[in-house]
Image: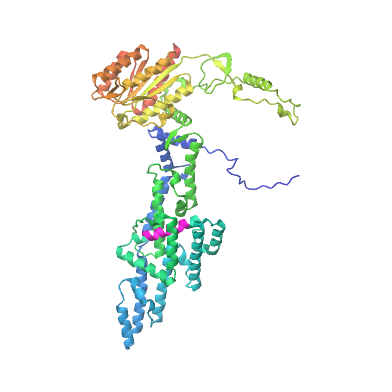
């Protein structure tokens, strides 16, 4: 027998993993969309809240702000100046204590030199560089000061260097010089296009302990160095002019003492040539702590604060074209660890999967729902409407399990077409497949039952083989739902209910009455027909005008295209007509309504009456002028007027439609 080895699968995504189910995410978005939000707003709110035990952007933002407050309270940025001055004063005090008992002129001259030292710490240290200390304790304190400055200054440029130089061994400083030289050589080789990953790995093998960020390639190393240099500049810009000058002089003096001034200047030039952003002015930061911070620690705090500020902006997603890809994953990892990165990736996956599985499309940066998503959201809206219907108002139609069937079976069949919901005729479907297979050369011979090759005689079905059972045709309806989109709908808080009602009615007709023809018309200053995919992402129009005249014209054309259907017209509005369409196609608005507006609107009402289409109007506001208008429409047309609270609008509209349709079937 062959030998087999089993190991962890590493050929890509797990082929046995269950599909990523984002329908629950879409349902959560649907709550916001049915509440009047757009798809982009609903997705943003979902990502802010988080999903399925994953932290959302709001939680990450909260942690960013808490971390920023913690860093700001850590200490003072001028701590290096305070530490240096304290050590310098200690050394001078120790020297004075040694000189005081000595009555010689040399002792007095030395005291005079100490008295003449400048107040500026960096200049004082420079003058004392060649001073011959009498006190051994003072000499050691001064050496400690200079060593501290060297380590802190290098730590401000290379994170972790302070620990690497904890032992003041000349060999350790020489290793730093060798590292800078090799780093320059590597950068120059990369500029010439001669750098390789092997060169970088050799460099890290030699000096990796000096770079605790553990970069994986030269670009990551350059990133860490650039962030450090920018943080050092921000630190200086956070100080007063006097403090800035004194600290800059201290840093320059420390590098000169260490023999690294030329090397660091050359490295800075090389990095600026690669990253022009180093030349841009850096804003300072504010710290609120009381404890003095060393230069390296202060630089780290400033660098982390800068990262957090950028992270806060990216997580806020409050700018044009915002995307989760804008969030720096490495910045999240540095601030909060691997778990936060996993949460961020889970949020990114939601957005990707919604698009990959066909629920969302990105059309030129505009997020839109697909028909598949709208159908699911519409079904949710319909379930809510049915849940709100009182038992006494319920119609039996919505509980039928044979949704989509048009009537009793006739015995005839026909080929299945996309969208058909009639039952499949299994025997005739299999017969069609057999005839097709024989026509294409015959079926492979079947072997005796139970034989190893017995499965070769199976019949393969294709979509064109399917046959559906013909049914008797029921009465069909041409339904036109006219929805007010004017600004007043938003002001009164009724627009969300109108949107949910339109989606619910669409879902009802699609699932229960697929033979009906539905049209949704939105009207404000103009009227326009709305596709199902537009409904979910639709917002109200911030314009003046309630052009019911134009909406009725579009509805009339819809009814005329389906003369064999029963006409049903439903109107949802919160105001009387205040606009009409002129002969040149432009809208005319006036308030109170112009007589011509009312005349033209009522003329369209009369046309609807001649089409035998009853206009059922759902009023969303109590207004005397609106009441007078709709009562006039009811008298002329014979339709009904229903005063509906916004929270029950969907129930009223759907229930009214079901009653009307039930009455038609009984005739």
Image-based side of 106 in relation to 264, left or right = left
Residue 225 magenta-highlighted: yes
Say which of 508 and 581 sits in front: 581
Q: Quadrant of the N terminus?
A: top right
* Residue bounds of the magenta highlight: 222-234
Q: Residue at x 36, y 80 (%)?
A: 95
Main secondary structure found in the magenta portion? helix
Task: List x then y, in percent, for residue 411.
Answer: 58, 13
Q: Residue at x 29, y 78 (%)?
A: 116
Does residue 567 appear in this view? no
Using the rendered view, name the quadrant where residue 643 is placed: top left
Q: From the viewer's perspective, is residue 557 above or below residue 328?
A: above
Q: From the viewer's perspective, is residue 653 above or below residue 25?
A: above
Q: From the viewer's perspective, is residue 50 above or below residue 585?
A: below
In the picture as drawn, the residue positioned furthest to the bottom comes out as 104
Task: List x then y, in percent, for residue 11.
Answer: 61, 45
Task: List x then y, in percent, for residue 501.
Answer: 39, 26
Task: List x then y, in percent, for residue 373.
Answer: 47, 32
Labels in figure, total? 0
Say which of 197 and 321 sits in front: 197
Q: Residue at x 37, y 29 (%)?
A: 497
């Amino acid at each position: 027998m062959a030998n087999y080895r089993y190991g962890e699968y590493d050929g890509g995504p797990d082929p046995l993993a269950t599909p990523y189910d984002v329908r629950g995410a879409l349902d959560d978005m649907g709550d916001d969309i049915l509440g009047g939000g757009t798809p982009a707003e609903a997705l943003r709110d979902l990502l802010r809240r988080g999903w399925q035990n994953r932290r959302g952007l709001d939680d990450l933002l909260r942690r960013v702000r808490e971390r920023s407050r913690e860093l700001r309270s850590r200490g003072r940025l001028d701590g290096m100046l305070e530490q240096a001055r304290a050590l310098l004063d200690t050394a001078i005090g120790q020297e004075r204590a040694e000189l005081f008992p000595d009555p010689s002129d040399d002792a007095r001259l030395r005291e005079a030199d100490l008295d003449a030292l400048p107040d500026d710490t960096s200049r004082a240290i420079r003058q004392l560089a060649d001073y011959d200390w009498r006190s051994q304790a003072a000499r050691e304190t001064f050496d400690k000061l200079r060593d501290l400055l060297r380590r802190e200054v290098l730590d401000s440029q290379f994170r972790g260097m302070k620990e690497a130089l904890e032992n003041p061994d000349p060999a350790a400083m020489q290793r730093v010089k060798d590292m800078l030289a090799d780093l320059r050589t590597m950068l120059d080789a990369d500029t010439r296009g001669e750098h390789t990953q092997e060169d970088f790995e050799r460099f890290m093998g030699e000096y990796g302990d000096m770079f605790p960020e553990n970069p994986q390639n030269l670009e990551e190393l350059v990133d860490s160095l650039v962030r450090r240099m920018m943080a050092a500049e921000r630190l200086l810009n956070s100080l007063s002019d006097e403090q800035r000058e004194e600290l800059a002089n201290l840093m320059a003096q420390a590098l000169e003492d260490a023999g690294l001034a030329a090397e660091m200047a050359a490295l800075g030039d090389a990095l600026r040539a690669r990253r022009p952003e180093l030349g841009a002015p850096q804003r300072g930061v504010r710290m609120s702590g009381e404890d003095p911070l060393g230069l390296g620690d202060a630089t780290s705090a400033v660098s982390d604060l800068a990262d957090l500020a950028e992270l806060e902006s990216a997580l806020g997603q409050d700018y044009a074209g915002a995307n989760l890809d804008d969030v720096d994953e490495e910045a999240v990892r540095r601030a909060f660890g691997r778990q936060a990165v996993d949460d961020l990736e889970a949020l990114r996956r939601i957005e990707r999967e919604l698009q990959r599985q066909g629920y969302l499309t990105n059309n030129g940066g505009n997020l839109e729902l697909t028909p598949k998503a709208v159908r699911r959201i519409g079904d949710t809206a319909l379930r809510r409407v049915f849940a709100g219907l009182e038992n006494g108002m319920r119609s039996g139609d919505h509980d039928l399990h044979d949704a989509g069937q048009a009537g009793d079976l006739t015995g005839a069949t026909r080929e299945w077409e996309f969208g058909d919901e009639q039952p499949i005729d299994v025997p005739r479907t299999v017969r069609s497949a057999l005839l097709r297979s024989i026509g294409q050369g015959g079926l492979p011979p079947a072997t005796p039952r139970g034989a190893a090759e017995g499965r070769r005689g199976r019949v393969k079905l294709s979509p064109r083989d399917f046959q559906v059972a013909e049914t008797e045709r029921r009465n069909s309806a041409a339904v036109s739902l006219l929805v007010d989109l004017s600004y007043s709908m938003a002001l009164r808080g009724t627009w969300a209910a109108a949107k949910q009602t339109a989606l619910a009615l669409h879902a009802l007709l699609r699932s229960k009455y697929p033979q009906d023809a539905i049209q949704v018309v939105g009207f404000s200053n103009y009227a326009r027909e709305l596709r199902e995919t537009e409904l979910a992402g639709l917002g109200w129009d911030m314009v003046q005008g309630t052009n019911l005249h134009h909406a009725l014209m579009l509805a009339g054309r819809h009814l005329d295209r389906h003369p064999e259907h029963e006409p049903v017209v439903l109107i949802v509005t919160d105001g009387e007509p205040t606009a009409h369409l002129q002969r040149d196609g432009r809208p005319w608005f006036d308030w109170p309504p112009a007589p011509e507006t009312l005349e033209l609107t009522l003329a369209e009402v009369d046309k609807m009456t001649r089409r035998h289409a009853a206009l059922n109007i759902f009023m969303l506001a109590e207004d005397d002028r609106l009441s007078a208008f709709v009562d006039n429409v009811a008298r002329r047309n014979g339709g009904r007027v229903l005063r509906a609270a916004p929270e029950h609008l969907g129930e009223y509209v759907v229930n009214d439609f079901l009653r009307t349709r039930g009455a038609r079937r009984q005739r």
